[in-house]
Amino acid sequence: MKNKIRGVFPPHNKNTAYGKVEKLPVPPEVHIPMKMHSGKPAIPVVKVGDEVKIGRLIGEMGGTVSSPIHSSVSGVVKRINERDPVTGQKAVSITIESDGMQTRCPELKPQIITCKEDFYNAIRDSGAVGLGGAGYPAWSKLSRVNLDELDYIIINGAECEPYVTTDTYTMYSDAKNVYRGVQLLLKYMQPKAKVYICIENNKRPAISVMQEIFAGDDRVEIKVLPTLYPQGERKVLVANVTGRVVPEGARLSEVGVIVTNVTTIAVFARYIKTGLPLVYRTLTIDGPAVRNPKNVLAPIGTPLRALFKYCGLIGGEPKKIITGGPMMGIAQPSMDVPVVKTTNCVLAFPDSADIEPKVTVCIKCGRCLSVCPMSLMPPNIEVSYENGRLDALRHYKVNMCVECGSCAYICPAKRPLVQVMQLSKEKLWLDEQKEKGIS
């Protein structure tokens, strides 16, 4: 990582980059999970039959690493589910029947920020989380940083995954809130060096807008990066921008850096200005089975089915649905899965695009080694996992893997390398729990 940032070059497919975001019709009901972030789930503070309006708190934080959740529609609480109605997993969620009025909660108002504590509290109350997909509560990340050791704040607008264009839209069309968010970070966190806004070089219009709005501010630099996947992965970004390497098991703040998503800062800046928390999500609807790819603004809790109805499908119900990009996204079991805070993209694929690859024997070509951004050795890790060698998994630093999928993407033998990495990490975690006496 010190000498070269490695990765792959999948097709961009940025079909929706600069189209107008369209507001999705309000669905008849929304299904809002209490776990849409890293950490503890939120705890419901409403009951069945309660009338709610947009922005009303319906789930309070469940711990110090958690995030509040607000109603995205006006209407009536219909159900409080103890299990996910789609997957059957034990997960609390709230179903709200919309009245179609979209009336805002009258208590919503602009926030008055006079000190650092006000700033952190506002970020917390906005419900902002890592909107690039990680979902870590923004206030938990920022408020825990030792500001005496903070050199750089990196605003991640790389958006290196194919298809996904919501961060690009934020920088291009919501630049004022990006500007406000950056100014708040500068004022209350005061990095010693500067703020970098990082954008891949295939997003020229967004780069131009950011350069124009921050012109003359020498505390902020628009860092134009080569188009390379996984350029936007946080550890890769830190190494590429600052030259600093994040050690195994360390937090980014330990090397004097924090990374936050560009849409995340726009969300909390908007909340401070208007009082409206995170209740809507801009997301990309695309993929070979989508008739009219679009970026849409959808209430959180909207079923994916409503998105596809709005954009249209080719050939009926898709064979596969992925939320997130095609490299690190997650296949979904149903079109009734709801939009959550971290949903930045929904992709639909027809039968013809969902062909299970034939896995063959590793041919020792070394391609996976040449593209791994963390300079790991995937074949050695795979053999160690298959042989149950936990000592070897530690030796080969499997916990440094960022699960970007570059190794599996480039592998001519179609080895399931990402799954092996994930399972290897789980093995090590379970072994650590066993050593601590935790069953």
Image (cartoon, rainbow, N blue to C red):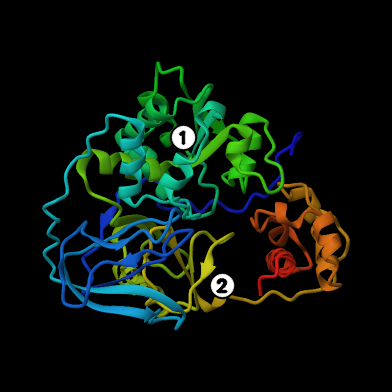
Amino acid residing under circle 2: Ala
**Quadrant of the image containing the N terminus:** top right
Count every numbered label the image shows and give the total. 2
Relative to residue 3, is residue 244 drawn left or right?
A: left
Looking at this view, is 33 or 140 the one in front? 140
* Quadrant housing residue 296: bottom left
Q: Nearer the viewer, residue 308 or 37?
A: 37
Q: Amino acid at mark 1?
A: Arg
Position of residue 141 measured from the top left corner of the image (x, y, whole percent): 48, 44
Q: Gap between marks 1 and 2, in whole Å?
A: 30 Å
Q: Position of residue 71 (x, y in %)?
A: 24, 62
Judge whether 96 appears above or below 300 on screen. Answer: below
Residue at (53% x, 54% y) in the render: 162
Residue that mark 1 sits on: 204
Q: Is residue 437 left or right of residue 396?
A: left
From this viewpoint, is residue 365 visible? yes
Instruction: Give the residue at mark 2.
Output: 353
